């Protein structure tokens, strides 16, 4: 059985945002992480440093070798305070920095959680009983209490397919509008495209956990397509 760890008792709240507008909304909060995108990384860096805030990034969940090389060659990465990583490639290459293990690691039980010394964001699939066990064997367990989950990340570009009947990289059609997928029951699922022309399909209802107070965990708020007013209301 995993042994309990000597922990520094504290509960923090982390915030992840995807756009510069969202970052401006939460700029004065603590533990803010910007969703890493090369197109906005420099602007985010300047905005955070201009407000005397530490620079933290939430790293993409999917990275090819080429993606990793581009990330590591970005001089901004050398200046960040903390990174949330979601794959073993970046984890191994960035272990000399302060890293937090994201949901991409899919850590769902105390045995896997105890294998790491870093702070851990629990998998969405973790039961409350397992969260209680995990919190005893980690230095810091973080639970996402608000945010839309990504149902799918796809190399296929639905926006490009709609306009050109094939994928055309960097066509920029995704920049001028917002897009949704509508299923047979009429439910709408927000779609956004990242800098690598991958499509991210979000669940239509945000995750919301209110009964976390008795757990010895830190919390995470994850904003992907929310407008500033919604973010303020959630905060």
Image (cartoon, grey):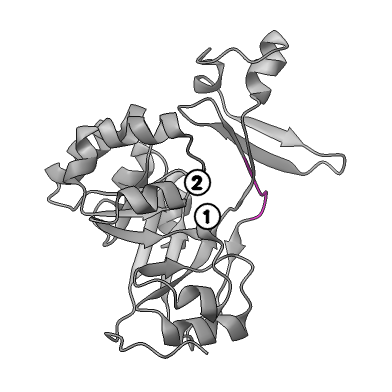
Q: Quadrant of residue 126?
A: bottom right
Secondary-structure class at tag 2? loop
Q: Is residue 203 magenta?
A: yes
Residue at the spot 31% in from the left edge and 89% down from the top edge? 6
For the residue carrying disc 1, how many other residues have a C-alpha within 10 Å: few (<14), some (14-19), or many (20+)? some
Between the residue at mark 2 and the residue at mark 1, the CA separation in whole angstroms equals: 6 Å
Q: Residue at x 60, y 57 (%)?
A: 206
Residue segment shown in magenta: 201-205
Name the spot of residue 212 as percent of width and height, x first.
Answer: 51, 80
For this view, does 56 lie left or right of residue 136?
left
**Viewer-nearest residue: 81 or 178:** 81
Q: Which mark is drawn over residue 61?
A: 2
- 110 to 3, vertically: above or below: above
Q: Observer-nearest residue: 49 or 64?
A: 64
Judge whether 104 appears above or below 144 on screen.
above
Q: Residue at x 47, y 84 (%)?
A: 213
**75 in magenta:** no
Q: Residue at x 20, y 54 (%)?
A: 81
Rendered position, 85 above or below 163: below
Asked whether 73 or 189 is in front, the reply is 73
Q: Reading the chain from its start, which is encountered first: label 2 or label 1?
A: 2
Helix or strand or loop: what does disc 1 sit on?
helix
Name the magenta segment's main secondary structure: loop
Quadrant of the image containing the C terminus = bottom left
Please name whichever residue, 222 or 195, is drawn nearer the observer in this view of the structure.
Answer: 195
Residue 209 placed where, x, y %? 57, 72
Contact between labelled residues 1 and 2, with CB atoms less than 8 Å apart: yes
The residue identified by callout 1 is 104
């Amino acid at each position: 059985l995993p042994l309990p760890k000597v922990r520094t008792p504290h509960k923090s709240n982390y915030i992840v945002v995807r756009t510069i507008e969202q970052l401006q909304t939460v700029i004065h909060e603590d533990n803010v992480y910007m969703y890493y995108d090369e197109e906005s990384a420099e602007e985010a860096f300047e905005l955070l440093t201009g407000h005397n805030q530490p620079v933290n990034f939430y790293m993409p969940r999917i990275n090819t070798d080429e993606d990793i090389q581009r990330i590591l060659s970005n001089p901004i990465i050398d200046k960040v305070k903390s990174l949330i990583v979601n794959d073993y490639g970046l984890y191994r290459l960035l272990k000399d920095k302060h890293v937090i293990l994201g949901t991409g690691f899919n850590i769902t039980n105390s045995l896997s959680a105890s294998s790491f010394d870093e702070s851990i964001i629990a998998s969405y699939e973790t039961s409350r009983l397992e969260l209680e066990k995990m919190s005893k064997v980690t230095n810091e367990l973080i639970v996402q209490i608000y945010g839309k989950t990504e149902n799918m990340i796809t190399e296929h570009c639905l926006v490009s397919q709609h306009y050109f009947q094939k994928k055309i990289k960097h066509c920029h059609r995704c920049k001028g509008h917002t897009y949704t997928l509508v299923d047979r029951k009429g439910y709408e699922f927000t779609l956004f495209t990242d800098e690598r022309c991958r499509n991210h399909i979000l669940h239509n209802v945000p995750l919301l956990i209110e009964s976390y107070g008795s757990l010895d965990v830190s919390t995470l708020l994850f904003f992907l397509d929310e407008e500033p007013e919604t973010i303020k209301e959630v905060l």
